[in-house]
Amino acid sequence: MENCSGDISGDRPTVMVTNDDGIDAPGLRALVRVLVSTNRFHVLVCAPDSEKSAVSHSVTWRNPVSAKQVEVSGATAFAVSGTPADCTSLGISQALFPSIPDLVISGINMGSNCGYHVVYSGTVGGAREAFFNGVPSVSLSYDWVGGKSNVNDFTLAAEACLPIISAIAVEIKNHNYPQNCFLNIDVPTDVVNNKGYRLTRQGKSIVKMGWRQVTSDTEGGKMLSTMTMDVSGAEAGGADFSSRQQEQLLFRREVRGGQIENDADTDYCTLQGGYITVTPLGALSPPEIDGYSYFKEWLPIVSERYSSAL
C-alpha cells in the first residue's frame, strides 16, 4: 500500500496518536474523537494492533512489521504489528505518512504512569521515541480504578487535557516549544472534580512485583495494565502441565505491595491529591548526587589496585 494521509485543510497542526493498549482501546478512541471534534487538528493514528502494555521502549529489530489501514472516524489510521516505539518511529518516518506530524500523543493509557513505572510504560515509550527524533510529544494516562472508573472517563480525561494540547500546538507553531524534554501527563480517577494542572517531577513510587509458580495457563488470572489482577477469567483447570515436558515450569507475576513516596512535589502524590500532573521527562538517567560522589571516590581506588596487580 502506498503511503497516505487524509486531507489537510488550512493551518491545522497534524497530531499523531499512538498507545500501548492497542488501536481498539477505549482510551485511544476517546482521545481521537475529542481531537477530531474540535476541528482544530489533522489527526493520524499509528498504534499497535494488539495490547502492548509494559513493553517499555522495546523495538522490533530483526523482522518487518505490518501496517494495516483501519477505520477510525475522522482520522487516517493504521494498526501496526509492533510496539508503541515501533509505531511512533514508523509514523514519523515519512514511510507511512507523507509528512512528519507536529505533535505525537501517546495514550490515553488505562492506568497511571508515575514514578518508576514510566520506565516500564509502553505509553511513555511511544512518546519518548518521538522525543528521540526531535518531534514534540506527550504521554497521557488516566488513573483507572476498577469499580470506580468507566469508559466515559476517557472522554472526560481527553477533554480535560485539551487546553494543554492546544497550548502546546500554539507553542510549536510559534517555534517556542522546548526540544530538551517531553511531557508525561496523568489524569486523576475523579476527573470531573480534578483540581487543575500541577507541574510535578518524577518520583520513585513503584508497585512491587513477585512471581508464583502455577500449574496451568489460566491459574491466578491476568495482570492488567493497571498493575492489578483480573481473576474473572481464571479457571481452576486450564491447560494442565501434565502434558508438558516435565522440566518446563510456569510462573506468573503477582503484586506484592508498593513503594510510595510522601513528597508532595512528585507525580504520584500529586495525582492522588486530585490534580492533573504535568511532568517533564528526558531520556538521560543521571544518578542522585550521592551515588555519583561515591563512585567518583571509589573508581580511582579500584583503578589503582588494578594497576598495582599487573
Image: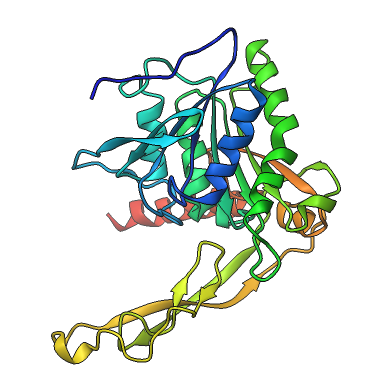
- Image coordinates of residue 18 in percent, x first then y, are 47, 38
Asked whether residue 52 is in view, the answer is yes
- Image coordinates of residue 46 in percent, x first then y, are 41, 34
- Please give left or right for residue 28 compared with residue 247 in the image: right
Query: Which quadrant of the figure contains the N terminus?
Result: top left
Instruction: State the residue lying farthest toward the top.
Output: 10
Depth check: 123 or 97 in front?
A: 97
When the figure is inspected, residue 157 is found, relative to residue 274, above or below; the finding is above
- Image coordinates of residue 196 in percent, x first then y, are 84, 43
The residue lying at 20 percent from left, 82 percent from top is 248
Depth check: 205 or 71 in front?
A: 71
Which color scheme is applied? rainbow
Depth check: 189 or 279 in front?
A: 189
Asked whether residue 285 is in view, the answer is no
Instruction: Please state the total of marks drawn on the protein image.
Output: 0
The residue lying at 80 percent from left, 51 percent from top is 192
- Image coordinates of residue 155 in percent, x first then y, are 66, 45
When the figure is inspected, residue 168 is found, relative to residue 57, above or below; the finding is above
Query: Which quadrant of the figure contains the C terminus?
Result: bottom left
The residue lying at 25 percent from left, 39 percent from top is 65
When the figure is inspected, residue 247 is found, relative to residue 119, above or below; the finding is below
- Please give left or right for residue 53 compared with residue 267 in the image: left
